[in-house]
Structures are given as structure tokens and as C-alpha cells.
Image (cartoon, helix red, strand yellow):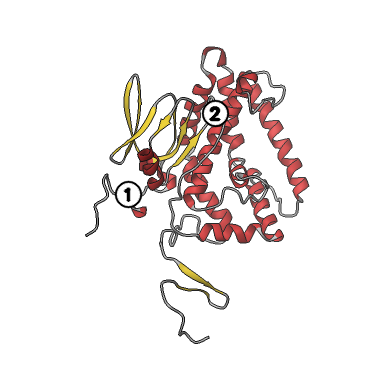
Amino acid sequence: MTKEVPGPPPVGVRELIRAQDRVSFVYLERCTVHRDGNAITATDEQGVIHLPAATLGTMLLGPGTRVTHQAMTLMAESGSTCVWVGERGVRYYAHGRTLTTSSRLIEAQARLVSNQSSRLRVARAMYAMRFPGEDVGQLTMQQLRGREGARVKSAYHDEAERAGVEWRRRDYDPSDFASGDGLNQALSAATACLYGVVHAVVVALGASPALGFIHTGHDKSFVYDVADLYKVEIAVPVAFGVAATHENVDVPSETRRRMRDAIHTTKLIERCARDVRRLLLEDSDPSDDTGEDSGVVQLWDDKRGSVAAGQNYGEAPW
């Protein structure tokens, strides 16, 4: 007789909400995170809040948080990304499980990044998304980096003029958030939020955060690749807007609030999911996720590509 496992049953993969339909992120600090059914609870001296786990993209856990084993089990079952962050939410430490049971995207990503020609093709496609209407098909990586540097520099100056904020240069210490001025603190907080959301989407879709096409050598190289597609559009304006009023607000908290609004307004999660699929699947329809939740394990074959698993091939003809 099978012993009944206590507690609510795990969330089925097909019941999970797609990455692009989830809430972007929730930041928690100085509280106890637990589970109540299929909801995450956060408890502090002010009371308890309930968060449906399957609707979360990223849960940022700041200083003073305590998390129970049951809460982490639910996060993993729900395919949500749980992130432990440093003071004011500027460090990224961990992520949960993928929403898909298919290796389709990560296999495509590995093929593309392992070949110099296809890697350059994808890198150029990423830069082309930042320079709409421009032909970058013949530019070298060095030329593309130079053009991107000029674009970012111009964007900072344009935002500084729009917000009425003095801009000198990007200056921050990753180990000491408070050492930066209000603008640099806002930029750090905004990019941390952006990285967390993009990381959540990348992992949820079943791609590898580490296999980057422009960035390399880091466990979040692909996250940085994808986040750079939206940084100037979303994170930079938010940061300059916060800096314009930073004397009257808590910079990290206000930045996170505005980033959450901007992510919702720009439909970033939906766009990010579509862009990742389009970049990695190239000629396929980016909105077509057919086959990404098949849950079928196969065996690789050097002649036929794959064969069915779960069979005994001991007497099969060779």
C-alpha cells in the first residue's frame, strides 16, 4: 500500500502559468516566508500576506528573510525563480526550476553558441534589435561594441537632460551599494531588477543563463545579453526619473516600484519570452511553444537523431 504524502499535491507542469503571463517580481525582506496550500506567505510584525506561487516570476529575498523548506518546495514546483539578494536588492544568488520539460531551447542554444558563424549571426541579431532600421549584417563585433557604446552614452546624456539630473559617469562599488550617489544607486537597483526578471524568463523557458553570445565566461552571460536589449528603454529612464526626486524618497524602494510598473506597462516578460525564442529558434514562429512541454524522454541516436526511451534494445538489429 502506497503511503500518502502529507500536504498539497505538487503543481502539474501543464497547470503552471506561462512565463510571459506572470507577475514580474516581488521583493521581501525581514520576514518569514512559508507556504499555505499553493500560496507563498510572508509574515512580519505587521501581519501576513499571501502570494499565489504559480503567478510569480521572481521572488527577491532581501536581508532578514527566513524561508521554510515547504516554501522552497512550492517555489520549485511552481517554476518560479527565487533569488537571495544583498542589501537593497542588488545581488543575485539562485533560481528555481524551469517551466518546461523539454530541452528544445537549450539544445538550440548550445548548437548556436558552439559554432562561430551561428554565434556571430545571433550576436548581430541582438545588436540589430537595438538599432532598428540599421543594417548591421556586415559589422564586426568590435564595430558593434563601438556603436553600442556610443548609443548608451547618448542615452545617458539624453535622459540626464530630460530629468534635469547631472550625469558624470557610471560609478559604483558592487560590494558597497551606499557608496554611490543617488543616480548610481538607482541605476544599480534598476538593472538588478531587470536582470532578475530576465533571468526568471530565461530559466522558465528552459534556456541556459550561462551560454551567452555577446557576453561570455559568466554563469549569467545570456541573461546580460538579453537584458541589454531592454536596459536603455526601461531601466535607464526609470533610474534617472528616481534620481530626479531622490532627496525625498528611498531610492532602492522607489526604483523597484517604478521598475515593476515599467515592466508591466512595456509587457517586458511577454516580449522577453518571444525574443528569446526568436533568437534561439531563428526561423521558427516565436509564439509557437508546441513541444516545449512534451515531457518525453528519448535516447540520442547518431543515425536517426533520437529513438524511444524505456525500451530494451538488447535484441534489436544493428
Q: Amino acid at mark 1?
A: Pro
Question: Residue 301: image x %, image y %?
Answer: 54, 74
- Picture residue at 65% right of the left edge, 19% below the top: 179
Q: Amino acid at mark 2?
A: Gly
Question: Residue 46: image x %, image y %?
Answer: 33, 19
Q: Nearer the viewer, residue 210 or 241?
A: 210
The residue that mark 2 highlights is 86
Q: Secondary structure at mark 2?
A: loop
Q: Nearer the viewer, residue 286 or 62?
A: 62
Instruction: State whether residue 276 appears in this view.
Output: yes
Q: Residue furthest bottom?
A: 317
Question: Residue 96: image x %, image y %?
Answer: 46, 45
In the displayed structure, would residue 272 be above or below residue 289?
A: above
- Picture residue at 24% right of the left edge, 58% below the top: 2
Quadrant housing residue 69: top left
Q: Earlier in the sequence, mark 1 or mark 2?
A: 1
Question: Residue 216: image x %, image y %?
Answer: 68, 47
Q: Which quarter of the image is occupied by the N terminus?
A: bottom left
Distance of label 1 from label 2 (alpha carbons): 30 Å
Q: Secondary structure at mark 1?
A: loop
Q: Residues within 10 Å of mark 2 (few under 14, many from 20)?
A: some
Q: Nearer the viewer, residue 152 or 3?
A: 3
Q: Residues within 10 Å of mark 1 (few under 14, many from 20)?
A: few
Q: Is residue 209 left or right of residue 147?
A: left
Q: Residue furthest left?
A: 1
The residue that mark 1 highlights is 10
- Picture residue at 53% right of the left edge, 23% below the top: 252
